[in-house]
Image (tube, rainbow, N blue to C red):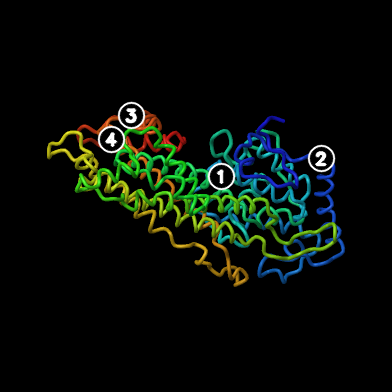
């Protein structure tokens, strides 16, 4: 096994291990295989005894009152993924699909879903050959789990529908034929076990969490740069301030911003502020809230991000299908672990966090370009002062419009539960919707940060890049390698796109 190979058994798997994994394998350890086989055998024996088992020898949902004979159980599984083939909307990315396959394998490998070891091997096979199901993003209310989107994984396992393979979308049957793979025939409960879970919302969340972490770190870089180009007092960043309000996120954000201003010739401390107070009539004893309170604002976001990561990690490691099978004690539990409430609330909270980040960025950029508040940087950061040049005037308008787009999408998805399926699913999580909503905010924030960083580089040009901290100087050089200074009015959309790529790479974080 290589260093970054992930071997899945019944044990807990961290998000970091999932993200870093190059290859994913199912454990071949004898005790693990026995654990999986015992659960599957207990279910098979119970079916033979003629006992009604939800979703195995009964119908689904409101149809759970309908009993089926044992010989109809396999056909029931086939029909489950087929009738749920009604997803709509933009396809999820291949990366999200890969995470979904890995997450579903982790959940089923706990050994309480009564699937066969052979099914786990099929997940391993798809991951090995990089066959990632094409999954429509819309069609789930987050309970009973992500039924419709997960049906696209079940269908690909069975050799149907479409998948990403070799960098393009292909018919699964053609992929299987090319690789000599036989379509999988689901055993009783197996299609239900694949589909009846919170995996799609968790996979969407996982991709978005990674992106948002980069954006938060990048935002702290921008704030640090603002402290420099606005000639700010770094007192609000000092260790004592945050030791007496010891929220971990706030402490970390303050440390990060302060470290990034190290060795700047533009910032100053409280003693210098006091000394200048009586000689400079325009100098307020304190800087504005958007600067002074930045660690407190971003610290809340950082702590919520950490909580959300933990919840998504625990969700991925949970057994979240129905019914649950306890082979050791010979019991079957019908329950509701498919309810994606933790993911829904994590994503709804991060939507508020994203909006607060966007709002802070909007406020700070407004100061940066306004000659009344930017301490000599001039009107709209213009390098040429003629009245027929406009500097960053329109860039601010775009940034503010994006902030409005982010902020207006903060309504919690979890409160919009829609009763469906003959009122059987009468209270649902809307977790997938919450995760999608959050993911849709991130491109806007990337564009906002891009505009802000281009403006920050312009401000550094005006102050003199040689006076900035080594950190800001390095970021300035990275930006200037992609985008020149704004001397005269020109279109900037291409410049914005270039710096978005830089942000996505983490280069400015």
Count of labels in the image: 4
Q: Residues within 10 Å of mark 2 (few under 14, many from 20)?
A: few
- Check disc 1 and report the residue beneath it: 96
Mark earlier in primary sequence (2, 3): 2
Question: At numbered mark 3, what does the secondary structure look like: helix, strand or loop?
Answer: helix
Q: Residue at x 79, y 63 (%)?
A: 332
When asked about the image quadrant of residue 178, the answer is top right
Q: Residues within 10 Å of mark 3 (few under 14, many from 20)?
A: some
Image depth: mark 4 or mark 2 in front: 4
Q: Residues within 10 Å of mark 4 (few under 14, many from 20)?
A: many
Which label belongs to residue 29? 2
The reply to whether discs 3 and 4 touch (Cβ–Cβ < 8 Å) is no
Mark earlier in primary sequence (4, 1): 1
Mark earlier in primary sequence (4, 2): 2
The reply to whether discs 4 and 1 touch (Cβ–Cβ < 8 Å) is no
- Check disc 4 and report the residue beneath it: 458
């Amino acid at each position: 096994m290589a260093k970054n190979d992930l071997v899945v058994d019944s044990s807990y798997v961290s998000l970091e291990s999932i993200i870093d994994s190059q290859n994913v394998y199912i454990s071949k350890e004898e005790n693990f295989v026995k654990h999986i086989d015992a659960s599957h055998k207990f279910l098979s024996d119970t079916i033979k005894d003629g006992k009604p088992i939800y979703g195995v020898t009964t119908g689904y949902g409101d149809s759970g009152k309908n009993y089926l004979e044992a010989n109809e159980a396999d056909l029931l599984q086939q029909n489950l993924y087929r009738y749920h083939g009604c997803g709509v909307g933009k396809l999820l990315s291949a990366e999200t699909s890969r995470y979904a396959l890995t997450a579903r394998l982790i959940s089923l490998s706990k050994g309480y879903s009564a699937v066969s070891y052979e099914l786990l091997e099929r997940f391993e096979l798809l991951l090995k050959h990089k066959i990632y199901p094409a999954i429509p993003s819309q069609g789930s209310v987050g309970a009973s789990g992500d039924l419709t989107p997960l049906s696209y994984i079940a269908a690909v396992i069975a050799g149907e529908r479409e998948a990403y393979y070799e960098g393009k979308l292909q018919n699964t049957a053609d992929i299987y034929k090319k690789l000599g793979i036989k379509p999988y025939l689901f055993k009783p409960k197996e299609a239900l076990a694949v589909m009846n879970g919170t995996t799609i919302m968790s996979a969407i969340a996982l991709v978005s969490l990674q992106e948002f972490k980069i954006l938060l770190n990048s935002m702290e870089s921008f704030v640090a740069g603002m402290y420099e180009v606005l000639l700010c007092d770094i007192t609000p960043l000092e260790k004592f301030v945050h030791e007496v309000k010891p929220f971990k996120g706030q402490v970390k954000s303050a440390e990060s911003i302060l470290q990034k201003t190290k060795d700047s010739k533009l910032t100053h401390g409280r003693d210098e502020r006091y000394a200048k107070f009586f000689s400079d009539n325009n100098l307020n004893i304190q800087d504005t809230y958007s600067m002074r309170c930045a660690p407190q604002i971003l610290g809340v976001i950082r702590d919520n991000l950490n909580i959300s990561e933990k919840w998504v990690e625990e969700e991925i490691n949970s057994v979240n299908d129905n019914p649950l099978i306890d082979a050791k004690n010979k019991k079957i539990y019908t329950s509701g672990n498919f309810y994606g409430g933790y993911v829904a609330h994590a994503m709804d909270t991060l939507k508020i966090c994203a909006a607060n980040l966007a709002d802070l960025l909007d406020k700070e950029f407004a100061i940066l370009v306004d000659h009344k508040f930017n301490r000599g940087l001039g009107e709209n950061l213009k390098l040429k002062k003629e009245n027929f040049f406009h500097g960053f005037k329109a860039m601010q308008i775009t940034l503010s419009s994006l902030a409005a787009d982010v902020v207006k999408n903060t309504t919690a998805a979890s409160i919009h539960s829609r009763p469906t399926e003959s009122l059987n699913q009468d209270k649902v999580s809307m977790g997938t919707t919450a995760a999608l909503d959050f993911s849709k905010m991130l491109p806007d924030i990337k564009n906002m940060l891009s505009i802000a960083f281009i403006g920050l580089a312009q401000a550094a040009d005006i102050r003199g890049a040689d006076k900035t901290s080594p950190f800001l100087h390095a970021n300035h050089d990275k930006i200037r390698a992609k985008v020149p200074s704004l001397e005269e009015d020109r279109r900037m959309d291409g410049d914005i796109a270039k710096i978005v790529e830089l942000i996505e790479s983490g280069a400015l974080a």
